[in-house]
Structures are given as structure tokens and as C-alpha cells.
Amino acid sequence: MSTPSPLDIASPPAVRPGAPVRPTPAPSATGCPDSGLVVDMGPVQAALGHRAVGLTLTNCGGKPVRVDGYPSVQAVDENGDALPVKVNPGSSYMGQDKGPEEVMLAPGKTMRSLLVWVSTPTGGDLIEGDALEIAPAPGLEARTFPLEGSDVRLLDEFNMTGWRTSTAE
């Protein structure tokens, strides 16, 4: 791959007027994870039985990091045990997946992914999850995000878009 142009490097997120402000994830006691990448999850949005959350990937390190792929997502129960919720890379009712975008993510810059699930029993029984463990990619440091609200916690399977410098359309 050639050296990315400034347009290939992710930009800081735009702030919507009236949108709730989520604090930037604080580094651990030892600082930024070894990968140089930290993931954050926005608020859950709902539409016609579908649930969606925006995921943000930030380079918290001091050097550019190559990003190309999908987040790693696992639903867990109240004890932190993994739940059998299928994870599918790809499009959904809430957003189209153009696939991941390979980028040399500069320090302080961000990328986005959209995580979607259905909270209605269309394909069978739903699984009740208490939290999501989300990592920038398989094998990297995961963060745990609680799922709050009874209908948000009901899961069938996840669909997610690849990491990109712009949001899914």
C-alpha cells in the first residue's frame, strides 16, 4: 500500500448540536494499550425493533497504526461469560457496509463502525445480554460496555460495518 494522503487519515468526530457528550476513554494505569488503539461505544439508537450503536476507534498512541478490518464483538452475561450471539460482518437495516478501509491511523485520529442487532423474536428466541466486550480487532485489548434498558439487552445476532474514516450510509 502507498503512503496515505491527508484525506486517507481519519478526522476527529463532528459534534452534533444537542447530542450527549461522552467522555473520551481514559488510558489505563499503564497508559494507552500496547496496540495504540482504544475503542468506545456510543449510545444505543432504536428503530422498528432494530438497535444500533456507533463504535469509535481512536489512535491513543504516539505513532501511526495500520487499521484494516472489523471490530471484535462479544456479548456477555452478568458474570462476564460469553453468550452464543453470532457476529456477521456486513450491511444491515441501519447501515450499508462498504467493507473495511485500510488506513494508517495517525495519533489522535479516529475511525468508525456501526454495530446493529434486532430486539424482536423474528428468527427464534432472543438472548439477554448484560454487556458487550468490544476490541479494535480480534486479539487486541477489549473494553466492556454495559447494556442498559430491557429491550436493548435482547439480542439475536450482530451485524457490523468495517472500520472506516466516514460513517456507513
Image: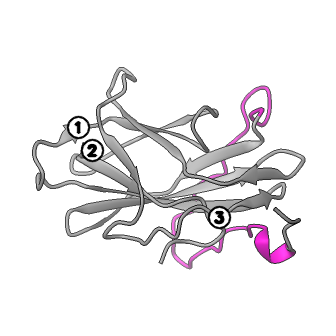
78 to 142, vertically: above or below: above
For label 3, the SS is loop
Q: Residue at x 50, y 57 (%)?
A: 42
Q: Which residue is drawn at 86% across and 73% down?
A: 5
Residue bearing the label numbered 3 = 101
Q: Dot 3, crowdedness within 10 Å: few (<14), some or many (≥20)?
A: some
Horizontal side of residue 117 vs 168, given as left or right: left
Q: Contact (CB < 8 A) between labels 2 and 1?
A: yes
Alpha carbons under labels 3 and 1: distance apart: 32 Å
Residue 134: give x, y in percent of width and height: 51, 41
Q: Residue at x 65, y 74 (%)?
A: 14
Which segment did they paint magenta? 6-34
39 to 118, vertically: above or below: above
**What amino acid is at disc 3?**
Glu
Q: Nearer the viewer, residue 4 or 47?
A: 4
Residue 137: give x, y in percent of width and height: 60, 42
Q: Contact (CB < 8 A) between labels 3 and 1?
A: no
Residue bearing the label numbered 2 = 153
Q: In which quarter of the image is residue 141?
A: top right
**What amino acid is at disc 1?**
Glu
Q: Earlier in the sequence, mark 3 or mark 2?
A: 3
For label 1, the SS is strand
The label number, if any, that marks residue 120 in the structure image: none
Residue 36: give x, y in percent of width and height: 78, 41
**What amino acid is at disc 2?**
Arg
